[in-house]
Image (cartoon, rainbow, N blue to C red):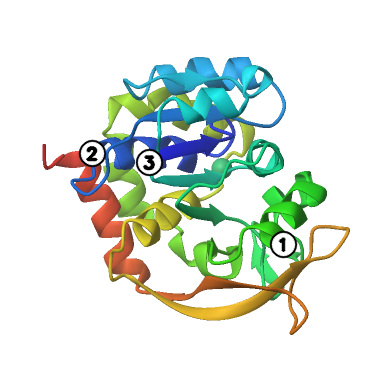
């Protein structure tokens, strides 16, 4: 598995990287970073996982092709993935965390457009239009992965996450941590914590994800047993199976 991430903002990207490295069904072969200062994000990723990390500014089809991943997990804006598809690269499996199929009340506001899709709507549209059969894990399901105080305390015992959790606490004091990206990892790894449906999707110019018969068919995560999924992720970090 290759992971494309905007690690460095929300701590859930870092959790997804650590959980992928620990997951018994996953061999993490590389990471790329996307959005904003991708060199800084790459430095953060290198501190978390012991695999090749390519900053988005240096990213091209050769960077990922040499690693020959069977699956790509995109947990940031889709800029890099759209570039890959544009270069003719087709991952065997592609999963993404992004979009929302209905407005979600999250972090004190109602969001009709999800951050990853809003940050690069053109790239999101390219990926949704041109890679049928992708696994889409949208915000209207992942927002239920918010950690309670006990779960947050468990996560905070992981010293590898200390810088990310400190940054988050400074940037968004008191804001709960929500494991959006790790849920996409569990879904891609085939864990039975989510329910999926085939849906025909398209992306509007503002990044809005819509169900439309004119769209492209994908497997969409429509439900999650959030308690079980959160426990699974915390357990992967606390007791790596290998
Ligand atoms: Ca992310």
Drawn side of residue 125 relative to residue 180, left or right: right
Residue placed furthest toward the right: 205
Query: Residue 78: image x %, image y %?
Result: 67, 44
Drawn side of residue 130 relative to residue 76, left or right: right
Q: Is mark 3 on a helix, strand or loop?
A: loop
Quadrant of the rendered image containing residue 240: top left
Q: Is residue 87 above or below residue 42?
A: below
Residue under numbered circle 3: 1
Q: In this view, does 112 lie above or below 102?
A: above
Query: Distance between the Cα atoms at labels 1 and 2?
Result: 32 Å
Q: Mark 3 and 1 residues: CB-CB less than 8 Å, in contact? A: no
Q: Residue at x 72, y 62 (%)?
A: 129
Drawn side of residue 46 relative to residue 80, left or right: left
Q: What element carries label 1?
A: helix
Query: Residue 210: image x %, image y %?
Result: 75, 74
Q: Could you tell which of marks 3 and 2 lies nearer the N-terminus?
A: 3
Query: Distance between the Cα atoms at labels 3 and 1?
Result: 22 Å
Pick the front one: 164 or 117: 117
Specify whether residue 108 is in view: no
Pick the front one: 133 or 17: 133
Quadrant assignment for ligand 1 = top right
Q: Which residue is drawn at 39% across and 57% down?
A: 188
Residue under numbered circle 2: 22
Residue under numbered circle 1: 129
State the quadrant of the C terminus.
top left
């Amino acid at each position: 598995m290759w992971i494309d991430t905007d690690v460095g903002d929300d701590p859930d990207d870092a959790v997804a990287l650590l959980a992928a490295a620990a997951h018994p069904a996953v061999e993490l072969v590389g990471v790329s970073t996307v959005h904003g200062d991708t060199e800084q994000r790459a430095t953060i990723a290198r501190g978390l996982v012991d695999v090749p990390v390519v900053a988005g500014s240096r990213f091209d089809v050769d960077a990922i092709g040499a690693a020959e991943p069977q699956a790509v997990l995109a947990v940031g804006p889709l800029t890099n993935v759209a570039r890959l598809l544009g270069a003719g690269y087709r991952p065997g499996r592609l999963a993404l965390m992004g979009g929302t199929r209905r407005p979600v009340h999250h972090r004190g506001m109602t969001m009709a457009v999800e951050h990853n899709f809003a940050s690069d709507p053109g790239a999101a549209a390219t990926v949704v239009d041109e890679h049928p059969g992708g696994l889409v894990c949208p915000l209207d399901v992942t927002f239920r992965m918010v950690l309670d105080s006990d779960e947050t305390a468990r996560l905070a015992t992981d010293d590898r996450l200390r810088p990310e959790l400190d940054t988050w606490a400074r940037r968004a004091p008191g804001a709960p941590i929500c494991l959006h990206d790790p849920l996409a990892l569990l879904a891609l790894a085939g864990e039975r914590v989510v329910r999926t449906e085939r849906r025909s999707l398209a992306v509007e110019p503002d990044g809005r994800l819509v169900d439309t018969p004119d769209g492209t068919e994908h497997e969409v995560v429509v439900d999650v047993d959030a308690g079980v999924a959160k426990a699974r992720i915390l357990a992967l970090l606390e007791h790596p199976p290998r």
